Image (cartoon, rainbow, N blue to C red):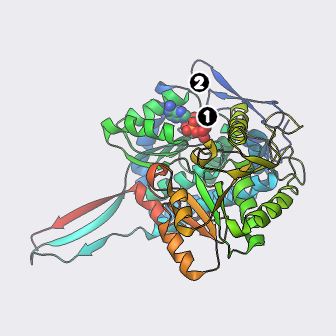
Amino acid sequence: MIALKDPSLLRHQCYINGAWVDAPDGATLAVHNPANGAALGTVPYMGAADTAAAISAANAAWPAWRKKTAKERSALLRKWNDLMLENADDLALIMTVEQGKPLAEAKGEIGYAASFIEWFAEEGKRVAGETLQSPWPDRRLVVTKEPIGVCAAITPWNFPSAMITRKVGPALAAGCPIVVKPAELTPYSALALAVLAERAGIPAGVFNVITGDARAIGGEMTSNPVVRKLSFTGSTAVGRLLMQQCAPTIKKLSLELGGNAPFIVFDDADLDAAVEGAIASKYRNAGQTCVCANRLYVQDGVYEAFAAKLVAAVAKLKVGNGAEAGVTQGPLIEEKAVVKVEQHIADAVAKGGKVLTGGARHALGHGFFQPTIIADVNSDMLVATEETFGPLAPLFRFHKDEEVLAMANNTEFGLAAYFYSRDIGRIWRVAEGLESGMVGVNTGLISNEIAPFGGVKQSGLGREGSTYGMDDYLVIKYICMGGI
Ligand code: ADP
């Protein structure tokens, strides 16, 4: 059904303790193509007991994995990275059919996903401790870094591969085994990564993928005392719940949660560059990323000109099945997502917003939605406070720098923010004034494996990627050596 060069990459079983397994009772979960509703197959519907078994297997694999030298682990990770790149076409196709994003974007994600494995293969070799100045002549103070232990990860459907490797890369490089629960909607990308991890020679139990009942699996991952760390990417509501569930066993947590990114265009901006950035930031993955521009603030003097240029640029987007050539915007992931975009549009229009382009479901049906721009938007509308997670660009008008900073920061979220200006003083003031973990200045694309990804406020805890991304998988040990 899916024309893969290597059909063995498409697996319908979980990968636990180095074995491909079904749920003990044979229960399954169906997976569909969001572009046409076609059934792609099933994956096991596992629960708490299966999760506990996977955690035990990871724990059993831990001593041998942590005992390997960083260089030995690095070599295995490097092999895994190479296999991902060699199989990029197949991995991208699997992603497009289960997630919907255009094939070119899916292939881009595979490169991005592999880059975390490559990066942490390198970073793992550079984990270092230190010796401190001792306050005592007869004792020496040494700080070492150790793998934290068994890790668990829960990942979303919008980046089915990269959100896994961004967690698994540093975990494995640090010497930790990990159990991953991918999103129900996109399990095949995760299972394909497991096929390649097995081929790369990652030992049994070190990387496990379990699919099934999210609550039951999450419940076990958060309550099992063997799990020392949970890394979650997804909604703020679920992140909050998981944090609560982790409290009794005091787990270390990384949370990459929702965003509500402001995208600010000042009077002195290069408008063509701003439009290009807005298209990349807003409409990538059909607007379904947590760093997507959600609120576009445009200064009074360039408001009309920017709106006209954005409308012209949006007209060039091609909506369709992501597997077809030339398509730049695939379907939304599911009906619920389409309904949310419709609600945001209806709310904005009812309160005075003006649809400049789009505004409705696309004629292709299913999850397809017209790329939309709404002008005359204000802070009383849902688009001002909620993450739309769809191809809707609401244009707010502002006059002064302080005014737009206050509006941009008036949210519980603080993940990414973007702005366009050519005034160096303004650039520093605004970059420093924005309450967000990441700021794009004169660019709409900021993510890569080298830079720290993460938020402030209710957008999350911790940083992923970069040299800081190792920290969450390490614990510091202080050794005081006396008798010298
Ligand atoms: P989204 O809105 O992106 O679907 P979610 O936070 O609902 O965000 O989903 C992200 C991940 O969290 C998915 O893998 C999903 O299965 C998982 N998830 C959802 N609810 C729970 C829960 N109660 N416990 C554990 N995991 C959950």
**Residue receiving disc 2:** 23
Q: Quadrant of the N terminus?
A: top right
Q: Say which residue appears at 61% left-offset and 42% top-offset.
A: 382
Rate crowding at label 1 as few (under 14), some (14 to 19) or many (20 or more) other CA atoms within 10 Å: many
Q: Say which residue appears at 19% left-offset and 78% top-offset.
A: 133
Q: Quadrant of the C terminus?
A: bottom left
Q: Nearer the viewer, residue 227 or 68?
A: 227
x and y, in percent, of residue 260 in the image:
58, 51
Q: Is 249 on the left-hand or right-hand side of 85?
A: left
x and y, in percent, of residue 454 in the image:
51, 57
Q: Say which residue appears at 70% left-offset and 38% top-offset.
A: 350
Mark yes or no: residue 210 visible.
no
Amino acid bearing label 1: Cys
**Residue receiving disc 1:** 14
Rate crowding at label 2 as few (under 14), some (14 to 19) or many (20 or more) other CA atoms within 10 Å: some
Count every numbered label the image shows and give the total: 2
**The quadrant where residue 293 appears:** bottom right
* SS label for mark 2: loop
Q: CA distance from mark 2 to mark 1?
A: 8 Å
Amino acid bearing label 2: Ala
Mark sitting earlier along the chain (2/1): 1
x and y, in percent, of residue 7 in the image:
79, 41
**Contact, mark 2 vs mark 1 (Cβ under 8 Å):** yes
* SS label for mark 1: strand
Q: Is 345 on the left-hand or right-hand side of 128?
A: right
Q: Is residue 213 above or below residue 391?
A: above
Mark yes or no: residue 305 visible.
yes
Q: Say which residue appears at 20% left-offset and 70% top-offset.
A: 141
Q: Nearer the viewer, residue 447 or 116?
A: 447
